Image (cartoon, helix red, strand yellow):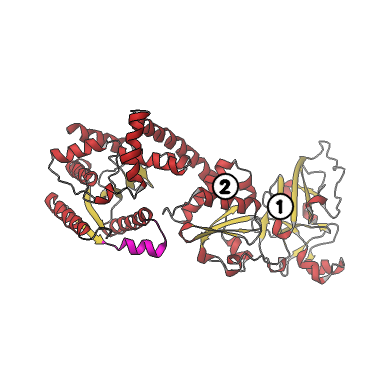
Amino acid sequence: MGGLEERVKETIARYRMLSRGDKVVVGVSGGPDSLALTHLLWRVQKEYGMALHLAHLNHMFRGAESEADSRFVASFAARLGLPCTVEEVDVPAYIAAHGLSAEAGAREVRYAFFERVAAAVGAEKIALGHHADDQVETVLLRILRGAGMRGLGGMAPVRDGRYIRPLIGVRRAEIEAYCREHDLQPRLDSTNLSPAYLRNRIRRELLPFLRARYNPAVDASLLQIAEIVRAEDDYMAGEARKQLDRLRRDPDVLRSIRNGQAQGVALVIDIAGLADQPVALQRRIIRQAFDEGRRGREAGLELVHVEAVRRLALEGRTGEMATLPGGMVAAREYGYLYLGARRGFPEAVERGKTLSPEAVGGAWPIRIPGRTEIPGLGLVVEALVAPAPGDGALPPFGEGIDREWVAVDRQKVGDQVWVRYRRPGERFWPLGAAGARKLKDFFIDAKVPRQVRDRVPIIAAGPRAEQIVWVTGLRIDERVKITVETREVLRLFCCHTPGAML
């Protein structure tokens, strides 16, 4: 069995599972996998300079049998001279209270327990006893349930830089042989024999059938699939992370729209930018945003949830919301998609209401170049960029203004362009005027009825949309007009009816 120890050390090195001096919590159920893992790590702990702390959770599924497991693990820890934390949690009650399956409920409680122990003892890593046969069963189970690339990659050897699986390349038969050689005398969990659990039926019925009738090496094939897919999934996850970082917006945008009523917003995503991504990246961006909102805790996000968020973002209306697992929601507010805890969204969003334009205090980003639709406002804004004529002459439309389009100096406007409604007390410099004046006074002179002034879309620039570029249908700002020095022209279209676009 010296070979097994070397292979485990190779796995630790290959996936960089441990750093010298790490403190490691080892999850120990009392079964052969966790006993072999603990014994192997105990034997090499001096080599890695690590400290081990065992953690055992009584799920209270099996009564006296579970209590006997707890006593066994405590005795095993004492035999090795290792500290051990043993707790019990009424998982059946937890499952009933949260409407979870037995497997999902037990997993959620178990990982929360590991995190508590790791925090209490100051551990950097949490070691789990999953092995190669577990990986085979996991991949096949996910195929049956309809998994994507993320699921087909199986269990990662290292997750979140914290959870490690040193036995992931070891077969079950090898582990059982190791336990016999070292007289570890593992406990046997009777639930592992129950046909009530799908994983047990895969292990005891489906895999033997596939080996006998279709492919004797089906285990190796499934492990190879997991390895290949996981590498590709890691690459795609990196690309999705880059796009999510690019598309995220300041959560204060929501608080501005909601007049400070929204709290605890996890993420704000630009919908126009999300729509530009391939479908595969859209789904991954949504998943990563969800994971970030949950702070890395898994909460059963399925494809049906991801697609609900995609439809909400790409086809939904302002104020609509999608309910997600783990107390999360996704809500659409004009050009933004919000993901966060349900409690972070005000009642108006919960009921799917749409705010009236008069109440809106925020701004919605405009794609340049590109087309931006804001269904909640009934607006469409299109931006085109073109070089100015080389001879310095003004374009044919020059400083022309009508009710739908204007042309302005691209450099003077900058990269951050927004559409919004008027703000109290703001000023701008109407084209051709002697200087800046209050927007309110401009509306009065232009004979804009009082009841529609709050509904006139305004194109603005700057980090907080503070500089007025165009009071649509009326006038651009003098400071962004085209001159003989203009090198690039930004042409903007804005209308309330998509069919009226030029």
- Any mark on residue 246, and which? 2
- Type of amino acid under label 2: Arg
Query: Residue pushed farthest bottom?
Result: 450
Closer to us: 281 or 437: 281
Which numbered dot is residue 373? 1
x, y percentage for residue 241? 51, 45
Given residues 244 and 58, the one toward you in this image is: 58
- Determine if the magenta segment contains residue 96: yes
Q: Amino acid at mark 1?
A: Glu
Label 1 to label 2: alpha-carbon separation: 20 Å
First in residue order: circle 1 vs circle 2? 2
Callout 1 crowding tier (Cα within 10 Å): few <14, some 14–19, many ≥20: many
CB atoms of marks 1 and 2 within 8 Å: no
Look at the image and tell me whether residue 16 can be seen: no
Q: Dividing the image into 4 quarters, which one contains the N terminus?
A: top left
Q: Position of residue 214 (x, y in %)?
A: 38, 28
Counting other residues with Cα less than 10 Å from the Cα at mark 2, is it few (<14), some (14-19), or many (20 or more)?
few
Left/right placement of residue 87 relative to residue 413 reads left
Callout 1 secondary element: strand
Q: Quadrant of residue 443?
A: bottom right
x then y, percent, for residue 420: 71, 60
- What's the residue at 36%, 63% (across, down)? 94
Residue 94: mark in rendering:
none
